[in-house]
Amino acid sequence: MITAARLIAHQSVNGKYQTRMAMDKFPVLGHQMTHSIDSFITDSANSATALYTGHKSSVNALGVYADSSPNPLDDPKVQSIAELFHEVRGGGVGIVSTAFIADATPGALTAHTRNRGQYGNVVDSFLNGITNYTWPSWTGPDVLFGGGAEQFIPSSKSFQGKDYYQEFRNKGYNVIQNNTALQAAPTTERSLGIFSVSNMAKWLDRNVYKNNTQIPKTSPDGSSAAAVDQPGLKEMTLKAIDILHKRNPDKGFFLMSEAASIDKMMHTLDYDRALGELLELDDTIKATLKHLEEIGELENTLVIVTADHGHGFDVTGGVDTKFMDAQTSDRAKRNAVGTYEQSGLSQYMVANRSAPIGSDQNLVYSAGVDFPVNWDPRYTLQSGLATFPDHRESYRIHKGSVRVPAINITGFSSNDYFLNYVDAITGFVINGTLPVSADQGVHSLTDVPVFAQGPCQSAFGGVYNNVDIFYNIATCLRLQRTKAGH
Ligand SMILES: [Zn+2]
């Protein structure tokens, strides 16, 4: 089962393509509403709690009802779908994310705290469960793959300063730290794969602008090396399925696999990297369905693809970047934007298979994988969020690194953000609509799609609340109480 979180408004991105994405071919489509108990805009802790426990909660809360005491670990707790499934069915659990693994979406499967920032505690909960509560059955996941070595290397950032690589080894885990080792890893052992110090490298940087992965001190072993051999979401997910399938031939498995950087790149207004992550997610879905079929489990597996919230992202026209570069005033640069009949068709959409690779004419489908070959065409999309900090916009790819739209300025307070001139030198100024303390975009109230296929798929059609996804999965897995006292 895959709950791939954080889907951007995929129709607008998909509009660049002439074929449907893998998720678009799922037989059932629903919409979930994401508001919480005490706020109509959710964060990822709050929404993960709703999706995993069937209880709406509060911003920053993982698997608890937030109380008013200062202790972040004493709040009333609710059991997650992974804990329930493991307790009632005895099956295996897999947790995969391209984020640092203590982040909210993976963390909420086992952590119970009012404060999602208790990262050391979150990592300990993966291994040991809740130590001061009455659910005794959690014995750790079969698979834990992602970034975030910071909470594993012994330091002030790890729980009680302990070495969590060693803690996992002590409980029989095979510890993996790069893609080569991941591919070679046996499917018989419980496996911990940590592939970078913090969030993992983005698809665009791993595959197109590869020099961007040469960042010292990102290696998961805590050395000064760069983490240059990182797997993608697809490699992690397929390996996770093989391990879960091998280890749980009779009792089945639950897998949560998250394309985390769709959201992270939306926050930094880095829409090209978000698109790369989204296409990688879709490629992962395609490969997952194929692999489930190969191992004879496709018809036994409920696959759900959804997001935990939206970002108010949309596409409104096309941009002639060459024309924009040639103008000198902000008002003239805005004439590079074409709307309605002047929007034309983005060059990402032109699949000219005879054009040479790298020319600005083509989107070549290679080996059935639908990634653009040219990420820097003259005609780009006018895309953006509904709300944002002060920034400049050129509607062009940021080749050197992840985008930084707003920065501090010397002499001003650290929560006073201004546009970052070098982020889009040839672009024009867009005045922010968020408080000046915001350096990124924010989540929005939009409903998000739910794609479902497999057993119980029909339960996921229509419009419903995010908590209903928990109840639908729990019912499908027959986790509900069947008689009083049971
Ligand atoms: Zn977010």
Image (cartoon, rainbow, N blue to C red):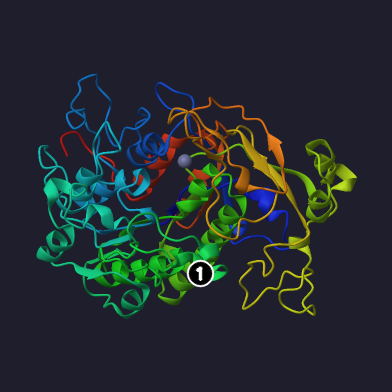
- Decide if residue 426 is in sight here: yes
Identify the amino acid type marked 1. Asn
Q: Is residue 284 left or right of residue 96?
A: right
Examine the image and state in which quarter residue 266 appears: top right
Vertical arrangement, residue 344 with respect to residue 238, above or below: above
The quarter of the image holding the C terminus is top left
What residue is at 54 percent from the left and 66 percent from the top? 283
- Decide if residue 457 is in sight here: no
Q: Mark 1 packing: few (<14 Cα in 10 Å), some, or many (20+)?
A: few
Examine the image and state in which quarter residue 54 appears: top left
What residue is at 26 percent from the left and 44 percent from the top? 119
How many dots with numbers? 1
What residue is at 61 percent from the left and 48 percent from the top? 422
Q: Name the residue under label 1.
A: 211
Residue pushed farthest front?
A: 411
- The picture places residue 236, in percent across and down from the top left corner, at 39, 67
- The picture places residue 117, in percent across and down from the top left corner, at 29, 38
Vertical arrangement, residue 297 with respect to residue 384, above or below: below
Q: In this view, does 449 lie to the left or right of 348?
A: left
